[in-house]
Amino acid sequence: MSAKIVNEGFVWWRGTEKRAELIGKLLIGATLLTASGNLLPTRSSGTERVQLTSPTRTSGNDARREAKRLLGLELEVLNMENELTTALLHGNFAALRRIYADNYVSVNPEGILGEKASALKEFESGEIKFISIHTDGVAVHAHENTAVVTGRGDVHWRFGGEERREHLKFMHVFVKRDRRWVLVAQQLTRIARPL
C-alpha cells in the first residue's frame, strides 16, 4: 500500500483563512491611516504654517511591516509542517533527523513521553508506518523565533503490523535555530468519535 497525502491542496490555508483575512484588513487599515495623515489641514501660527501629521502615520507603517513579518513567519512554519507530514508519509528518515531538534520531546495519546532517538528508531525499524495523514483546522501562532501549530489530524497508520485509524488533536512547537525551523515538542491527544 502506498502512502498518500490527503490534504486538499494546502489544507493549512483553510485553518488560517480568517487570520489571512484579518491581516489583509490590517494592511488596508494601515494604508488608509497613512493616507489620512496627508489629508489633515494645516494651521497658521503667525506667518509660519505648521503641517499637522497623523499620530498613527508611523504606527500604520509599523503595523503593515509587522503584519507582513508575521505572515512570512507563518508561511515558513506551514512549509515546515508540510515537510514533516511528507517525511512521515514517505519514511524520509534523513528529513526527519533534520526536522526534529536534538532536544525534541513528545507526548503521545497514551501519555508516554518520547524523545528524538526513540521516535526515529520506531520509524526506521518499520514498527510505525504512516499510510495517510489528513489535517484540518490548522493554525499557526508565531512569536519571534518560536511558533506553535495546532490542528486536527485523521491518521491511518500501521503499528507493529496492525493497522489503526486515529482522530487526533495535535500541537507542534517549532523553534528557529540557525535560520531554519526545527520541531522541539509535540503533543497528541486522541479525540473520541461520537457514538
Image: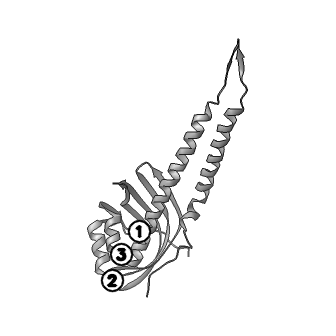
Mark 3 and mark 1: Cα distance apart in space: 9 Å
Q: Classify mark 2: helix, strand or loop.
A: loop
Q: Position of residue 79 (x, y in %)?
A: 46, 64
Task: Name the kind of residue labelled 2 in the image.
Answer: Gly
Q: Residue at x 35, y 75 (%)?
A: 92
Q: Position of residue 29 (x, y in %)?
A: 65, 44
Q: Quadrant of the C terminus?
A: bottom right
Q: Position of residue 110 (x, y in %)?
A: 37, 69
Mark 1 closeness class: few <14, some 14–19, many ≥20 residues within 10 Å = some
Q: Earlier in the sequence, mark 3 or mark 1?
A: 1
Near-viewer residue (56 or 165): 56
Query: Is residue 31 rendered to the left or right of residue 170?
Result: right
Pointer 1 and pointer 2: residues touching (CB < 8 Å)? no
Q: Nearer the viewer, mark 1 or mark 2?
A: 1
Near-viewer residue (157 or 32): 32
Q: Quadrant of the N terminus?
A: bottom left
Q: Classify mark 1: helix, strand or loop.
A: helix
Mark 1 and mark 2: Cα distance apart in space: 22 Å
Q: Residue at x 70, y 13 (%)?
A: 47
Q: Quarter-wise, where is residue 48 in the image?
A: top right
Residue 92 is labelled as 3
Q: Which residue is mark 1?
A: 84
Q: Earlier in the sequence, mark 2 or mark 3?
A: 3
Mark 2 and mark 3: Cα distance apart in space: 19 Å
Q: Looking at the picture, does residue 65 appear above or below residue 55? A: below
Mark 3 closeness class: few <14, some 14–19, many ≥20 residues within 10 Å = some
Q: Position of residue 171 (x, y in %)?
A: 44, 61
Near-viewer residue (118 or 112): 118
Q: Looking at the picture, does residue 106 appear above or below residue 146? A: below
Query: Is residue 128 rendered to the left or right of residue 164?
Result: left
Q: Which residue is mark 2?
A: 160
Pointer 3 and pointer 1: residues touching (CB < 8 Å)? no
